[in-house]
Image: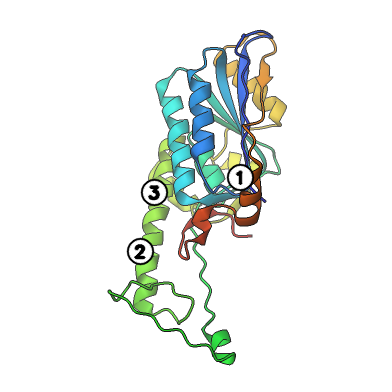
Amino acid sequence: MFWMARVGFDPTGEGGEQIALIRIEGVITQSEEITKLLNRSQENDHIKAILLRIDSPGGAVVPAQEIYDAVLKIRESGHKKIVTSMGTVAASGGYYIASASHFIMANPGTLTGSLGVIMELMNVEGLLSKVGIAQTTIKSGANKDVGSPFRTMTDSEKALLQGVSDDIHEQFIDAVAEGRSLEVEGVKVLADGRVFTGRQAKAVGLVDGLGTLEDAVQKTAELAGIKGRPKLVETQNEFSFLKMVQTKLFGSASYFVPMKFYYLLSF
């Protein structure tokens, strides 16, 4: 699975009032392309509204936060409506981004929610011992090798990382509360990592409506005041074969960082 984005616009303005479709698909590993596409759509006078199609289980924390900020800035500018349509899954970081839009529409069977943070670490100490390999670490501080796969983590180290996780979780809760205009305490009740169907999410206020991508297009047009059938515009981003291969093989270079927190559905 890899992340991809597409957006399009007709610079001539022919074919009716336009809605830009921006797709966020797969694991989110970087934000630059999506934020660039959001900015282009915001600045293009022929684009009357923006529709995000999210089909993602989430991903790295910072890219999700940066895309959220870009969406929220568009919403707060008041110049254009921005709506989210949820596909098969729009969870964790995918939901984080969606929460900044004016309106969220999910399919009844969409998997969403999973408001939480996860970091998984591997311990290969026993395996290396069996094959006779020993690891020596030279470090300048007691916590410099926290999360090392070559030894068992201490209780104090677990507490340290739990504190980091809790702070990132609070950032998630605050962002959803701001984006959805909800009370922080109300979001906390829902932010235990559980997943919801689209129908369940609507019942607890995490989404606004149920419907297909086509329904979301019509809702976007309605919110933007577009008369008649809008023109949904989408084109392929500039293609790079090398980038595609790198992404498929390695995801993002940030995945080589041994310790990383994610807004990511864990199954």
Q: Residue furthest left?
A: 141
Mark 1: give few (<14), some (14-19) or many (20+) Cα within 10 Å.
few
Secondary structure state at the residue bearing disc 3: helix
| Residue furthest front in the image | 242
Please tell me whether mark 2 or mark 1 is closer to you in this view: 1
Q: CA distance from mark 2 to mark 1?
A: 36 Å
What x and y, as percent, mark residue 10?
63, 15
What residue did someone put label 1 on? Answer: 243
**Near-viewer residue (179 or 137):** 137
Q: Tag 1's secondary structure? A: helix
State the image coordinates of residue 110 (x, y, percent, origin top left). 67, 43
Q: Residue 98 is drawn in which quadrant?
A: top right
242 displayed left or right of 166: right
Judge whether 213 appears above or below 14 on screen: below
Which quadrant does the C terminus fall into? Answer: bottom right
Q: Are marks 3 and 2 in contact (CB under 8 Å)?
A: no
Question: Which residue is at the front of the view, 221 or 29?
Answer: 29
Residue drawn 47% across the image and 80% down it: 150
Tag shown at residue 171: 3
| Residue type at the position of mark 1 | Lys
Q: Residue at x 39, y 49 (%)?
A: 171
